[in-house]
Amino acid sequence: MSSSVPYERLIAYAAGKLSPMEAGLVEAYLNANPAAAATVSRFREVSHSLRTDDTVAPPAKALAAAKQLYRENPPKVVNTVAAWMQGLQRALATLIYDSRPQVALAGFRGQGDRYQLAFEVDDIEIDLDVESTTSSGKRNLMGQISGVERFRPDSVGLSKPGTLELVASATPDDVGMFKLDVSGGTFDLLIGVDDRLVVVPNLEL
Amino acid sequence: MYRSDQELVQACLAGEAGAWDVLVERYGRLVYSIPTRLGLGESDADDVFQSVMSIVLRYLPSLRDEARLSAWLIRTTYRESWRQAKEAKRRRGQTLDESWADSGTPTDTQVVRLERQQQVRQAMDQLDERCARLIRAFFFDTTTASYEEIAAELGMPVGSVGPTRARCFKKLERLLSDI
């Protein structure tokens, strides 16, 4: 097809609304026009998203309760933190592995006293091994921070959730390994790497 | 006016309650649908929803630099759904069945699919009602509605259906590139 294909016809093609003959002509045009092919590709994606979107809206009551959370607990300005930590760019790590669901399903009693977690953010991976020591009620948190590029984290610490108030801290060794001992509870793991502060949120130890 | 997630988070931190309302509305469907899709009942899904929104509120300072808030929310909601399911079973003296083995962490494919749906929903929400209707009719109607039928439904001249729809698609394309 030598002449330009109207935008509307490209959309009709993306939606599968052209006859085989018309579609063939559009395809010939797309082969020679990468920008038009990209438009078709985007609208195929939109069509697919709209057709497969089976999400449901939360009930009005749940929505209102969630909005109320802010009024009841507005965010506070943290003023107990070292200035350098405040200035760092924050990055929240996300969980990519948790050994506990598999252990629980296998029915191994007692295995919950030790478990492994893995988190990632950007180019950094954080592997954690949590062990309870029954005699003292303490938790041993061993971890290793690794990344695509070789780097050394400046420091790690455990803080009260949502704050930068440290309850324990350590300096990782040359291969990014560290160990922290704390009483059980919920903490954020904070890792200072260059100009970033990586936050592993809501860690139950 | 559309505000990015990061702008909304900054506004929340500055004390603007309305910005929080927008965030809750924007991500309500995404968050609420995960526990329901995983099989939790309405009461448990409500608990997961509140729990995730509480976590978002608590971590607002750390989310101010988060470029992919939806991906973080998806993983957090899966995690909270798993916790809630485990807790609900424990209260009944039961344990989770095998179908929950991998439910605590979604696959990358699941995350990307849900993120993409979220982006399309956000873009569609910004379109005016007529544009949204034209686009939905185009992609959803199995039998192609005639221009006359669409024009009658939307109260517009028959001759302007095609050009209006093209303009709407272009607007949607622009919105998607901004999100």
Image (tube, rainbow, N blue to C red):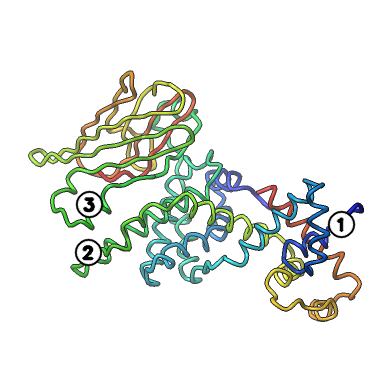
Check the residue under mark 2 and report the chain it is in. B
Disc 1 or disc 2, which is closer to the eye?
Answer: 1
Q: Is residue A183 above or below residue A27?
A: above
Q: Are marks 2 and 3 in contact (CB under 8 Å)?
A: no
Residue at which label 1 appears: A5
Name the mark on residue A103: 3
For image coordinates 78% across by 56% down, the residue present is A27
* Foreground pick, B80 / A127: A127
Q: Is residue A17 above or below residue A93?
A: below
- Element under disc 1: loop
- Element under disc 3: helix
Are labels 1 and 3 on one chain? yes
Q: Is residue A104 left or right of residue B78?
A: left
How far is mark 2 from mark 3, CA to CA? 12 Å
Residue at which label 2 appears: B95
> Residue flagged by tag 2: what amino acid is it?
Thr
Q: Are marks 1 and 3 in contact (CB under 8 Å)?
A: no
How far is mark 1 from mark 2, CA to CA? 59 Å
Disc 2 or disc 3, which is closer to the eye?
Answer: 3
For image coordinates 37% across by 56% down, the residue present is B80
> Residue flagged by tag 3: what amino acid is it?
Val
* Foreground pick, B125 / A20: A20
